[in-house]
Image (spheres, rainbow, N blue to C red):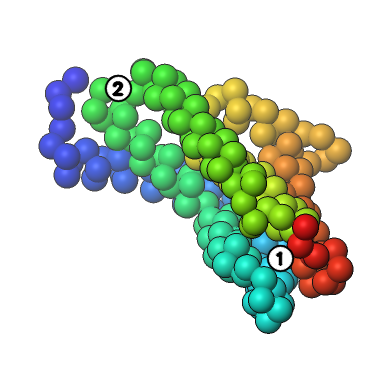
Amino acid sequence: MPVMHSTDLWTHAWASALPVWQAAVRQSGWHPVAAAAAMAAIALLCLAAGRSAHAVGHASVTWFMAVAALLLLALNTLFSFDVLAVGLLRGVARASGWYEARRDVQAAALVAIGTAGLATWGALRHRRVLAAPATRWLLTGLAVLAGLATLRAVSLHATDELLNTRLAGLTVGRLSEALGLGLMATGAWCELRGPCAARA
């Protein structure tokens, strides 16, 4: 297969990815709307928690970062930008001739992202930011959502199948999303209550 000029390659990838993305947005149903609404509501809760922490002199930047992350995730949930990104990369891989080797690239990406995540968690373990129970709840929930978003973006066949497996009427992906949001909401509520957020 002849190698395309980079501009033609991306044009070709866009042409193949766009219909798939549009179909995904049209056929998404009510679940993404409900999930995005829950994310927006918890973002407001985290905003209130951040303002409360700031008012009493506690570290608040983590809460405001969580607000930004939740709003970005809500937008992605509504408009499936990850589907578009995966479609574009798939189109580029096909047009440039390395699509057959994509599994190795995807696996390497997962290992690299997982290693970076573990290293970050290890670096933060003994920092003051994790001293508060509320912050631990928040970051654990955010880690679940970030891990879920990573698995969806990398889109390995095995992980896609796992996330689409149904339990109690919902997919494992949706249940994991609910778990992450629940942990973040617990952390925000904990911070707002005061005694639960007392620093060690």
Q: Nearer the viewer, residue 46 or 157?
A: 46
- The number of numbered discs placed on residues in the rendered structure image is 2
Q: Which residue is tagged 1?
A: 42
Looking at the figure, which quarter contains the C terminus? bottom right
Q: Which residue is more in the foreground, 51 or 73? A: 51
The residue at the point 17 percent across, 39 percent down is 6
Identity of the residue drawn at 31% across and 45% down: 15
Q: Quadrant of the N terminus?
A: top left
Q: For residue 155, say whether it is visible.
A: no
Amino acid identity at mark 2: Trp
Q: Is residue 115 above or below residue 70?
A: above
Relative placement, left or right, of 1 versus 121 is: left
Q: Is residue 108 visible?
A: yes
Give the residue type that dot 1 points to. Ile
Q: Mark 2 to mark 1: distance in Å?
A: 41 Å
| Image: 46 above or below 86 | below
Per the rendering, the mark at residue 184 is none
The residue at which mark 2 appears reads as: 98
Relative to residue 9, is residue 88 drawn left or right?
right
**Residue furthest to the bottom:** 55
In percent of the image, x 66 and y 76: which residue is there? 57
